[in-house]
Image (cartoon, helix red, strand yellow):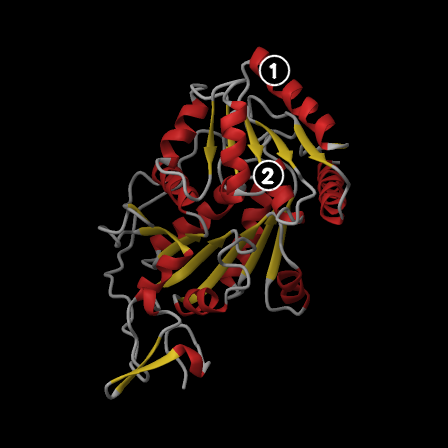
């Protein structure tokens, strides 16, 4: 027995309903009976007249990566784009999107998190005002067809054999990472080439590159030319860490600078909201938070001074001039990739290309040390590229 949608073969996930057997592993996406063929996504493709429209010029390093990416795609390869946080991964793939759409091919852009789907969708609408860009995620499922689909990984179940080019961002992140069901659904959604985007490729991705299954292009230099922010690491007892945190808050209030305070758990976020609301305008931001878009907008407008967030906000989001502090950065929930992503929120703006990242911990874990080494290496290789 094998599910035609998710590839499940485990008999524990099959259930008999009368004479029919169906897969329970992916039943949340709709029931699929054993042996039932999936219906390909029905969409009338059209040749779109579209050119990328950006408010800023691409750097020569971005242009070089774009040329290499397009050459690899023309040769029929899948490509892994390994680029530092804030290096412009989204802009790098826009020319490929335009080329496929001009040829009448279908394009999808899939991301792990709903918040990032909405942000990427707005950026795509600005870059491609001539076409219909549709966001498909929780709360946005009334319209699922367009010239360019931007969706969460889970929503790819709607697009069986639906895309000639599928761009997959944050492939190393939860919930896609190590999720065989989502990987199978994503695989069956594409009949052409795939582009994988990440600032933190995992070991499996790197092995696929070494084996020749994927081509890789790299970019470690941000458009403004400034190096990636490397964290200041404070290893001290909890009481000393608390003093550093309060000092950080006071200093940023005087500077009128927003920041993100990352904490390891939802419980910790709720506790800190109660305590730190005595010291400044703040709110907790977790997977259980309602009106996430409103809180981000309030931080951007400095109506809130900082957000106390879990890893739900570690990726994809750009906030002008934001700094980052990570409480209990030695907690097991913070692995190397998540630490790199969190510190990667800092210094993304062209007008504010630098900033501050602070790790508070009782000991320097392997993840913390590897994060610091990885950022240092990216900066060194970025300098080599420039020179």
Q: Nearer the viewer, residue 63 or 280?
A: 280
Whole-angstrom CA distance, mark 2 to mark 1, is 21 Å
Q: Quadrant of the C terminus?
A: top right
Q: Who's the residue at 29% across and 80% down the image?
A: 33
The mark that comes first in sequence, 2 or 1, is 1
Residue in view at x 52 percent, y 36 percent: 269
Quadrant of the rendered image containing residue 244: top right
Q: Secondary structure at mark 1?
A: helix
CB contact under 8 Å: marks 2 and 1: no
* Drawn side of residue 253 relative to residue 99, left or right: right
Residue 315, can we see it?
no
Q: Which residue is mark 1?
A: 250
**Residue drawn at point x = 33 percent, y = 65 percent:** 28
* Residue at x-position 48% and y-position 66%: 183
The vertical placement of 375 against 218, above or below, is: above
**SS of the residue at dot 2?**
helix
Picture layout, residue 106 above or below residue 306: below
Q: Write down the quadrant of residue 187 in the picture.
A: bottom left
């Amino acid at each position: 027995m094998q599910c035609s949608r998710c590839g499940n073969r485990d008999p524990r996930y099959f259930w008999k309903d009368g004479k029919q057997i169906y897969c329970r592993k992916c039943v949340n996406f709709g029931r699929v009976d054993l042996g039932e063929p999936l219906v390909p996504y029905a969409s009338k493709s059209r040749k779109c007249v579209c050119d990328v429209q950006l408010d800023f010029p691409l750097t020569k390093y971005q242009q070089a990566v774009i040329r290499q990416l397009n050459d690899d795609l023309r040769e029929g390869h899948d490509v892994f784009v390994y680029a530092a946080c804030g290096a412009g991964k989204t802009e790098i793939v826009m020319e490929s999107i335009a080329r496929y759409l001009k040829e009448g091919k279908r394009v999808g852009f899939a991301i792990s998190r709903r918040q990032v789907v909405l942000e990427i969708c707005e950026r795509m609408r600005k870059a491609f005002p001539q076409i219909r860009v549709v966001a498909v995620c929780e709360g946005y499922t009334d319209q699922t067809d367009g010239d360019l689909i931007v969706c969460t990984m889970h929503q790819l179940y709607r697009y069986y054999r639906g895309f000639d080019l599928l761009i997959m961002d944050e492939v190393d992140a939860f919930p896609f990472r190590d999720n065989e069901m989502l990987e199978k659904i994503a695989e069956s959604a594409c009949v052409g080439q795939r582009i994988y985007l990440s600032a933190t490729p995992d070991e499996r991705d790197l092995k696929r590159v070494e084996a020749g299954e994927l081509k890789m292009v790299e970019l470690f230099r941000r458009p403004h030319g400034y190096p990636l922010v490397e964290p200041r690491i404070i290893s001290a007892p909890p009481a000393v860490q608390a003093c550093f945190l309060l000092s950080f808050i006071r200093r940023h209030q005087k500077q009128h600078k927003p920041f993100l305070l990352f904490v390891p758990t939802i419980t910790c976020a709720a506790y800190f909201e109660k305590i730190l609301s005595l010291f400044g305008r703040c709110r907790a931001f977790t997977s259980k938070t309602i009106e996430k878009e409103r809180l981000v907008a309030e931080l951007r407008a400095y109506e809130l001074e900082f957000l106390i967030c879990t890893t739900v906000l570690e990726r994809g989001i750009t906030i002008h001039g934001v700094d980052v502090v990570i409480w209990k950065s030695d907690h097991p929930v913070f692995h190397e990739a998540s630490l790199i992503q969190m510190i990667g929120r800092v210094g993304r703006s062209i007008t504010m290309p630098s900033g501050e990242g602070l790790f508070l911990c009782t000991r320097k874990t392997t993840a913390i040390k590897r994060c610091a080494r990885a950022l240092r290496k990216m900066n060194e290789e970025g300098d080599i590229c420039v020179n």
